Image: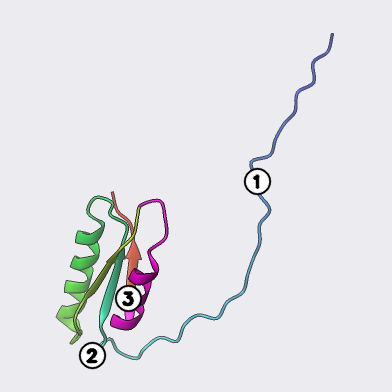
Amino acid sequence: MAETIEVLSPLAHVAVHEATAAPRPLSLDGLRPGILENRKANARLLMETMVERLGERHDLGDLVVGSKPVGGPPSDSTIDALRNGADFLLIGSCD
């Protein structure tokens, strides 16, 4: 008696969307940095250190920090705070 084996492909349908990159400033001087961290260990520390190093080379404005859950999006209020309080963002995670 022959058995049937079903082989499933792990490949998903790939969709490619074109987008125009945001314009880049000529300098970071005077711009307000923002951080969106996901509460993973050392994520905020890493990004705050990056902003400190950028601040050694550029006259940055005040830092705005927003947090989001590890497995979910930021709240609307966090997005609004970052949108209104920062001119550029660092977004990342760390373990």
Residue 83 sits inside the magenta stretch: yes
Label 3 secondary element: helix
User: What x and y, as percent, mark residue 77?
Assistant: 35, 71
Question: SS at mark 1?
Answer: loop
Q: Give the number of the mark in front: 3 or 1.
A: 3
The structure residue drawn at horizontal position 31% and vertical position 76%, both measured from the top left corner, is 81
Q: Earlier in the sequence, mark 1 or mark 2?
A: 1
- Quadrant of the image occupied by residue 33: bottom left
On the image, numbered disc 1 is attached to which residue? 11
Q: Amino acid at mark 1?
A: Leu
Dot label at residue 22: none
Residue tagged 2: 30
**Magenta stretch: includes residue 78:** yes
User: Which residue occupies 28% across, 74% down?
Assistant: 34
Q: Secondary structure at mark 2?
A: loop
Q: Is residue 93 left or right of residue 53?
A: right
- Viewer-side residue, 59 vs 35: 35
Q: Say whether residue 49 is left or right of residue 31.
A: left
Callout 3, which amino acid?
Leu
Which region shows up in magenta?
A: 70-88
* Residue closer to the observer: 48 or 57: 48
Q: Which residue is mark 3?
A: 82
On screen, 76 above or below 30? above
Work out whether residue 64 or residue 6 is closer to the camera in this orientation and state it. Answer: 64
x and y percent of residue 25 in the render? 36, 89
Residue 35 located left or right of residue 24: left
Residue 12 appears at what percent x and percent y?
65, 49
Which residue is at 16% across, 73% downward?
52
Amino acid identity at mark 2? Gly
Measured in 3D between alpha carbons, the distance from the residue under mark 1 to the one under mark 2, in whole angstroms, is: 46 Å
Q: CA distance from mark 3 to mark 1?
A: 36 Å
